[in-house]
């Protein structure tokens, strides 16, 4: 291990204390949000025969701008509807790079509706399950700003992580096309000897903020015989690869869709093929929509929302037997394809990635319903549930 120049012992201690405090504060915020939410959601207020999963970007917000239809839609689900009850909902997004508690707080402020951390599924949320296998094993965390995804990984129980920035701090020639990373952007106060400290996995948590650097360092690790950064290359994959979001594009304030994390996946696969002369395909495990693991995770959150407020709701199997889950999204290959595979009722809106003309549906991944915006989607959900109740 090599100490960073001019880093005092006091500075190291302060740095470690700051990391601990950030993680502790995130966990405390999440716990407080869950307790407050539980107190406000009385058992008699729930309508448990339906639940809704919303995408965020292009559905409730567009970039940093909250959509007025989104505010009204969530107000309806919180009881301002003909059923007179709250309908459980979660936010199921392929976004990430922040903790669930941070995302919940940001969306709550933006939309003016209280949302708990236990209602948020980020692209990397189910990756917390990887801690069972990699808790203390050295893992490369790719994506996000600075060290944020490394901190999230630690919060998930991945205790031994490094980032591409850390590699460049160790040896700037590993990616000479950037300024040396700042101390605040490094995942630890000490720089490892990456020529000796082998990796056990590569995990792409969020969008790359430097495609070139992240492609270089990830392929270095994946190709090295001994899974170190500067190990001898082989045409065989050395460690497992996990990636959290296959969306090729996403919607923000710009009038046309922008590249998402899926674009990095495409580049990584192409680079692997070129560098190995097509000797073997790059193997990886995907998280995020439309993968089944995201929908299973969201179903468990919906179960917990009801059971935590009303223990008399019955067993989970009874809840699920009655419950119809509606998914509202703007991206057919992710939102609609995943919902359809999960057996949910899919609703496609025209306020994001999908821009089909009125009266049209996506031809490859058709939704059960197409709505102009999220408010119209929720109105249709409530009418459908009224008709369902009247017919029984």
Image (cartoon, grey):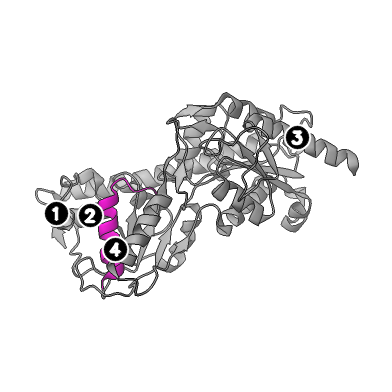
Residue that appears at 48% across and 60% down: 286
In the rendered view, would you say 191 is above or below 117? Answer: below
Element assignment for label 2: helix
| Mark 4 lies on residue | 219
Q: Could you say which is closer to the camera, residue 336 or residue 86?
A: 336
Secondary element under disc 1, as helix, strand or loop, is: helix
**Quarter-of-image position of residue 222:** bottom left
Point out the frontmost of discs 2 and 3: 3
Q: In this view, does 49 lie to the left or right of 60?
A: right
Compute the Cα span from label 4 to label 3.
49 Å
Spatial CA distance of label 2 from label 3 is 51 Å
Task: Tell me the residue that label 2 is attached to.
Answer: 166
Question: Is 37 in the magenta?
Answer: no
State the SS at label 3. helix
* Front: mark 4 or 3: 4
Residue beneath label 3, please? 382
Determine the CA span between mark 2 and mark 1: 10 Å
> On the picture, is 311 further left or further right than 356?
right
The residue furthest left is 6
In magenta stretch: residue 218 = yes
Please report the bounds of the magenta region as a residue range: 206-224
Instruction: Mark 2 or mark 4: name the one nearer the start of the chain.
Output: 2
């Amino acid at each position: 291990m090599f100490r960073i120049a001019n880093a005092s012992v006091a500075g190291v201690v302060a740095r470690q204390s700051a990391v601990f405090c950030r993680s502790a504060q995130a966990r405390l915020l999440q716990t407080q949000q869950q307790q407050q939410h539980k107190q406000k959601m009385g058992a008699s207020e729930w309508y448990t025969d339906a639940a809704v999963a919303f995408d965020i970007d292009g559905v409730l917000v567009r970039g940093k701008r909250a959509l007025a239809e989104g505010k009204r839609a969530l107000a309806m689900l919180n009881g301002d509807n003909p059923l007179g009850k709250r309908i459980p909902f979660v936010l199921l997004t392929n976004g990430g790079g922040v903790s669930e508690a941070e995302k919940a707080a940001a969306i709550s402020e933006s939309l003016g509706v209280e949302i708990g951390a236990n209602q948020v599924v980020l692209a990397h949320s189910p990756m917390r399950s990887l801690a069972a296998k990699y808790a203390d094993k050295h893992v490369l965390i790719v994506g996000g700003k600075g060290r944020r995804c490394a901190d999230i990984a630690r919060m998930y129980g991945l205790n031994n992580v490094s980032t591409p920035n850390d590699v460049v701090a160790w040896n700037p020639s590993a990616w000479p096309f950037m300024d040396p990373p700042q101390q605040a952007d490094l995942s630890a106060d000490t720089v490892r000897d990456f020529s000796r400290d082998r990796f056990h996995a590569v995990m792409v948590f969020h969008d790359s903020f430097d495609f070139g650097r992240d492609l270089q360092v990830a392929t270095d690790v994946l190709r090295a015989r001994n899974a170190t950064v500067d190990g001898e290359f082989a045409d065989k994959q050395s460690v497992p690869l996990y990636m959290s979001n296959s969306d090729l594009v996403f919607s923000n304030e710009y009038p046309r869709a922008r590249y998402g994390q899926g674009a990095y996946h495409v580049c990584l696969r192409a680079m692997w093929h070129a560098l190995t002369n097509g000797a073997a395909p790059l193997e990886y495990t995907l998280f995020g929509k439309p993968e089944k693991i995201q929908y299973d995770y969201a179903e468990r959150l919906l179960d917990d929302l009801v059971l935590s407020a009303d223990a008399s709701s019955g067993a989970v199997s009874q809840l699920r037997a009655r419950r119809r889950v509606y998914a509202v999204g703007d991206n057919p290959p992710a939102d609609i394809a995943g919902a359809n595979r999960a057996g949910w009722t899919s609703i496609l809106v025209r306020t994001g990635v999908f821009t089909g003309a009125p009266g049209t549906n996506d031809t490859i991944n058709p939704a059960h319903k197409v709505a102009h915006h999220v408010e119209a989607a929720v109105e249709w959900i409530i009418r459908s549930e009224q008709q369902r109740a009247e017919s029984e």
